[in-house]
Image (cartoon, rainbow, N blue to C red):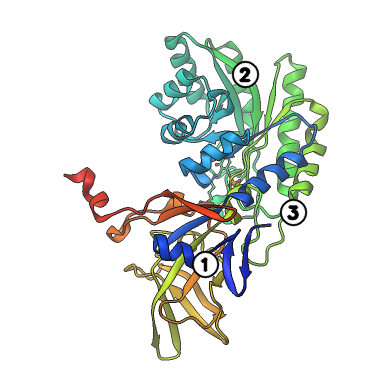
């Protein structure tokens, strides 16, 4: 459910027409709906009801500082995967104790930074990492709370680039090694074991993979508790998919029911790390048609947003709905492409769209997650502005980069 709808035949975000935003901020521009973000947080939180849980929003999905500030106001915690993300959430006013640090390649500096800040826990992905955490914790005179990320070898049936819970993926500790690594943790100084978890992938549109993976770590948790290892948290990761095209992902309620049914009798506090399901449908990339061209019977609509602004179609062959801001009569089959010098620079291929003409505005839907956060300056293109709509008003929450910004660090 989102708040992008036509009002009098003009596409709007909540109470603000997208033409007004394009007029005032220019294009391309990311536009986020605060009401949609809020709704997703509330519905997910309510779906877990009285089951003890903490929602730790996955910052990588969209790390805009103003959005992070809103999440802080709404009581959300954060999952971060780098020193930079940790810096951002602390800057946004997050309590360190609401933050968890994950990542398969945490550096010494990042671990030290997280321990100094006093994060809720660090997720551990290997024995060498565990030993390093112990060493740093001892040197800094603190005890590191750790959760072991298990790789349950479950197929999330998603794009291979965003599958993370198979044995061939680099993430986590295999179920067969888990016991020995965790037992090593019990005897290391400076380490307090507080839980186990898993994250098997992203854009998962079925419940079975979650059920299978979580059941696997629940069994392990039971064994550990039996052996006298006290646990506090069961981290079930993120990964729930959204509808970009014809997918019919489970509702937040159905997801919560499944997670609760496999884990509830353990009595641990659930950690949820949703990213896409919170931010994905809360944002669009608004762009303008530069011109059209044809090659024989092939028609191209060239827009002012490129793969540097939204890389998902090029990287994952992903589908994003296109909605004309002021729809015209008639349809045509076109490739919607950007201005970048790569043939992977497309937003849609062989897509039937409402006729578009030079100067028209088009909304690339479901771009709120892994949109701006994956943007680059390729082709020396300044990154787009970001706008947050709240009811009838909007504000620029990141200004458009300038040419000067492009070279600032090279002078
Ligand atoms: N927790 C961990 C440890 C993760 O690695 C991720 C995402 C999440 C939580 C959040 O997953 P979500 O709920 O958003 O599925 N760039 C790709 C997605 C990469 C996801 C990486 N990890 C895309 O555009 O589809």
Q: Report which residue position mark 3 lands on.
A: 250
Q: Earlier in the sequence, mark 1 or mark 2?
A: 2
**Rounded to the nearest whole Å, what is the CA distance between mark 3 and mark 2?**
32 Å
Callout 3: SS: loop
Q: In percent of the image, x 47 and y 53: which residue is there?
A: 387
Q: Nearer the viewer, mark 3 or mark 2?
A: 3
> Which quadrant would the N terminus be assigned to in this image?
bottom right
Crowd tier of the residue under label 1, counting other residues whose Cα lies within 10 Å: few below 14, some 14–19, many 20 or above: many
Residue 80 horizontal/vertical position (percent): 51, 35
Viewer can see residue 280: yes
- 50 on left or right of 361: right
Foreground: 269 or 381?
381
Q: Report which residue position mark 1 lands on.
A: 363
**Rounded to the nearest whole Å, what is the CA distance between mark 1 and mark 2?**
46 Å
Residue 340 horizontal/vertical position (percent): 34, 67
Q: Quadrant of residue 331?
A: bottom right
> Which quadrant would the C terminus be assigned to in this image?
top left
Q: Is mark 1 within 8 Å of ligand 1?
A: no
Foreground: 216 or 386?
386
- 265 on left or right of 318: right
**Rounded to the nearest whole Å, what is the CA distance between mark 1 and mark 3?**
25 Å
The correct choice, above or below, for 370 with respect to 119 in the image is: below
Q: Earlier in the sequence, mark 3 or mark 2?
A: 2
- 155 on left or right of 363: right
Q: Report which residue position mark 2 lands on.
A: 193
Q: Is mark 2 within 8 Å of ligand 1?
A: no
Callout 1: SS: strand
Find the residue positioned furthest to the bottom. 296
Does the CB distance between marks 1 and 2 fall below 8 Å? no
Viewer can see residue 124: no
């Amino acid at each position: 459910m989102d708040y992008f709808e036509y009002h009098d035949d003009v596409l709007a975000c909540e109470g603000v027409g997208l033409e007004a935003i394009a007029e005032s901020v220019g294009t391309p521009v990311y536009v986020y709906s605060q009401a949609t973000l809020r709704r997703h947080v509330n519905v997910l939180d309510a779906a877990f009801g009285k089951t003890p849980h903490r929602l730790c929003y996955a910052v990588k999905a969209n790390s805009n500082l103003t959005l992070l500030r809103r999440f802080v106001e709404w009581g959300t915690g954060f999952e971060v995967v780098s020193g930079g993300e940790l810096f951002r959430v602390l800057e946004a006013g997050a309590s360190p104790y609401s933050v968890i640090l994950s990542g398969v390649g945490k550096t010494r500096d990042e671990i030290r930074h997280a321990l100094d800040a006093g994060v809720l826990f660090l997720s551990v992905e290997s024995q060498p990492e565990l030993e390093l955490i112990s060493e740093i914790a001892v040197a800094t005179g603190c005890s590191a709370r750790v959760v072991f990320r298990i790789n349950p070898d479950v197929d999330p049936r998603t794009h291979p680039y965003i599958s993370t819970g198979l044995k061939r993926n680099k993430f986590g500790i295999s179920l067969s090694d888990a016991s020995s690594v965790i037992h090593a943790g019990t005897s290391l100084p400076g380490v307090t074991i507080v839980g186990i978890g898993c994250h098997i992938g992203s854009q998962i549109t079925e419940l079975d993979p979650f059920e299978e993976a979580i059941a696997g770590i629940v069994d392990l948790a039971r064994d550990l508790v039996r052996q006298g290892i006290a646990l506090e948290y069961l981290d079930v990761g993120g990964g729930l998919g959204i509808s970009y095209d014809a997918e019919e992902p489970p509702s937040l309620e159905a997801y919560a029911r499944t997670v609760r049914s496999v884990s509830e009798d353990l009595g641990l506090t659930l950690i949820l790390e949703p990213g896409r399901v919170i931010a994905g449908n809360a944002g669009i990339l608004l762009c303008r048609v530069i011109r059209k061209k044809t090659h024989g019977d092939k028609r191209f609509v060239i827009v002012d947003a490129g793969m540097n602004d939204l890389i998902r179609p090029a990287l994952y062959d992903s589908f994003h709905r296109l909605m004309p801001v002021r729809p015209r009569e008639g349809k045509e089959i076109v490739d919607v492409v950007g201005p970048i010098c790569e043939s992977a620079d497309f937003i849609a291929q062989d897509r039937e769209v409402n006729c578009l003409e030079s100067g028209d505005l088009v909304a690339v839907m479901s771009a709120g997650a892994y949109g701006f956060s994956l943007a680059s300056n390729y082709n020396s293109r300044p990154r787009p502005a970001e706008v947050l709509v709240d009811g009838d008003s909007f504000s620029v929450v990141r200004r458009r980069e300038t040419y000067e910004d492009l070279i600032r660090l090279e002078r």
